[in-house]
Image (cartoon, rainbow, N blue to C red):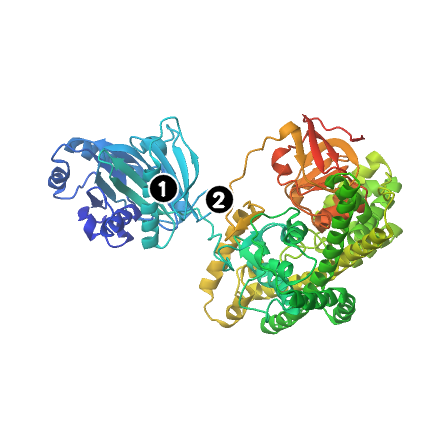
Amino acid sequence: MQHPRSELVELSDVIDARYGGKALGLATLAAAGFSVPAAFVIANADAAALPSGLEARYALMAGSGKAVAVRSSASGEDGVESSFAGQYESVLGVGGYDELLAAIGRCAASASSERATAYRSAAGISGAMHLVVQEMVDARAAGVVFTADPASGRRDLCVVDAVLGLAESLVDGSASPDHYEVDRSGRIVDRQIASRPALDDDEVMAVAAGARAAEARWKMPLDLEWAIDRTGEIRWLQARPITTLPGDLSEMDSTVAGEDHVYTRCNIGEMMPGAFCPLTASVSGRAIEYAMQMVQVTAGFQDSYREDRWLQLGYFSGHLFLNMTEGTALSSGILGNSLEQYSLSIAGRVVDELVPVPPKPFLLRLVNTVRLTTFTLSAGRAIRRLDRDLARFETPSAAEPAALLTELDSAIELYNEATLTHVRSSARSAVAANVLEQTVVREAIRAGRSQDEGRSRTAVLLAGATNVESAVMLAQLDGVVARLAADGTEAKAFLEPDAAEAVVRLTGGGGPTSRAFNRFLRRHGHRGYRELCLREPSWGDDPEGLGTIMQAMLRARLLTGDAVRTVPPAPEGVSRAVRVMARLARAGARGREATKSRMVLVAHRLGLGYRLLGEQLAATGRLPDADLVFFFDRSELPDLLSTDDAGDLIDRAEARRAALPYQARLDFPDVSVGKPVPTRPKPPEPVEGGVIVGRAACGGVVEGTVRVATTIAQARELQPGEVLVAPVTDVGWTPYFTLIAALVTDIGSSVSHGAVVAREYGLPCVVNTQGATRVLCTGDRVRVDGDRGTVTRLDRTSVPSSPTSA
């Protein structure tokens, strides 16, 4: 077979990727006006058959004694699909024609190396070897710049790595580079530098700005090599697409309602923790948005529901945020609700970033207060109406995709109403709890006690609510585990198989324990971790997850016996008015939990319906797999069903699915002004005197060993008697409350899920510590003081020990 003839190609003649990605990258940079060292291409390089005119062309470039570099530019290399990084040879500092010939031979031969051949085969690429001969830069500093962070997938960051001299020491790993991260505004947001920095800040920002300009021309994230010569000029040596990025983490971001608006993960982070697929955001997120807007409409703060805008919430990098600025309308437009009260109910602290809205005229506030109070207090009628609708509602299950999508769209209205009913019930609960706390704290101060003592008394008064759904659910599941523990044979049969098989066997059994478990599933099987996520399985659909929790509960019960939890006794000297307010607050908590269960039931059935839609589309070949349906926005589904060529839609959905694990790893500040921007994970923060201060949510003092669990998967390692330290908890964490000695969370308020369940089980609880998961480590020994709202680190130890009451 005759090989293509080797020939010389000028950089200005390279207009496509036929001579490899490296040659095209340099040619594109040069054509766009970037300062690129002189270069030419040897097409179809073959050391045994060099192109005519090579020596003369080399002499023209290196006639003044300049050294050159010979780099590979093979077909497929440095392209959109693959990089071939490190697979082929590059030779730097070539001086003289004989050295050039030797370098060409080395680089051309590297195409036949075992590693390069294997890489090409795996990538499904074949093609010729081309070489770029380029003038070397006498570099004072050099490095690489990524227009997106390849580690986190964030496209709002430009990453600059720099070394003194040539970049080869960076590429081969022989030098540790200075590292900079530059945001979209050109600000350096992170730096890790040596004692003698390779660049000053202006040079860092200039490199980042040049890279962003190249990215704009390519219309994709780039990896560029650069050098700064002795005159201070930036020379661009290489440009190639970053091939390892997931989809754009911010592709589905909503529009910021206002550049000065305050967004928070508090409160909404309990209901919807972590990152969510686009379908969940456009169904569950929009249902919450609808409900909160309708509260504003009812109270007279908004003319009508705006379906086309995110006002009360924001969806950024896969996470949902609450817009506190929009919520301040309540503080300015009704009586008896200050900005401070609103902040405390949402974030557990006064949010200084919130700007007070001037109060409305008194008469208007009075009218609005009556309207809003009537709306929240009449939630009972809405609950009864919702129950009638739920009795008629079945999981969408049409046999044909178009009909099924119609069913799902019809069910959205019910979901919106269920969510609005829950928000009404939650408002009633939060208002009652806030009024109670303010009253008790004022009484404590008048009696010469501290605010913390007042909050502790409030937490005790909030305990003891009957029929709270989360507590009932936990009691029923714990009852099943108690039955298993009471019968050695049943306990052994449940612990021996894997978790999923244990649950399947228990479900199919005919004895009293199986009947009790099936009763639990009928009432609570739609609940679970991240239960408003349409993609996440419920307990009833996830025997492995539920079985893992139950096996942990069973082992703990066999170790510790039938421990009795005690609710703290009611404080003495409580006025009749305070007792009435406490009763209303407990009733509010009960109603809030009940309506949440109804809302989750609708979400669960919608999730099953959408999964069925995905299965139908996968069976007909319209989707590659059923799970991908969750990575479309709801508004895109009609196009997916109707278009003959859904390739672009499917590609975007695939990119979103690839992005979700990266989004899930992002951390955000609890409060952001304007669009929330992820923060770098922070190192453990020093704590004065070893004391972490939060908010008292349930009284009592316990010493125990810490178990830090930032995810529900990590919570599976919990041992009996440990102190659970978590960012936040939702219903999915509830079964672990039978194992723990105390609960500590980063965020939360007195009516958050963790606080409510902790009170019902008499567990000391401290919420809103603003970072206990960063300060404490698994194995630390701490004292949790639920009366004062403090967590004291006693010592660091990796040896677990049983908690002792102090």
Q: Secondary structure at mark 1?
A: strand
Answer yes or no: is residue 108 visible. no
Question: Which residue is found at the position 19% from the left and 51% from the top?
Answer: 12
Residue that numbered label 2 is attached to: 152
Query: Where's the C terminus, which quadrant?
Result: top right
Q: Are marks 2 and 1 in contact (CB under 8 Å)?
A: no
Using residue 199 as the reference point, say whether residue 763 is left or right of it.
right
Answer yes or no: is residue 711 visible. yes
In depth, the one of 466 and 484 nearer the eye is 466
Residue 283 is labelled as: none
In depth, the one of 169 and 541 nearer the eye is 169
- Which of disc 1 and disc 2 is earlier in sequence? 1
Question: Which residue is found at the position 16% from the left and 31% from the top?
Answer: 98
Give the residue type at disc 1: Val
Q: Position of residue 479 (x, y in %)?
A: 85, 47
Q: Position of residue 351 (x, y in %)?
A: 60, 48
In depth, the one of 690 and 532 nearer the eye is 690
**Distance from the alpha carbon under mark 2 to that under mark 1:** 15 Å
* 343 to 772, vertically: above or below: below
Residue that numbered label 1 is attached to: 145
**Image-quadrant location for residue 713:** top right
Question: Which residue is found at the position 73% from the left and 70% from the top?
Answer: 393
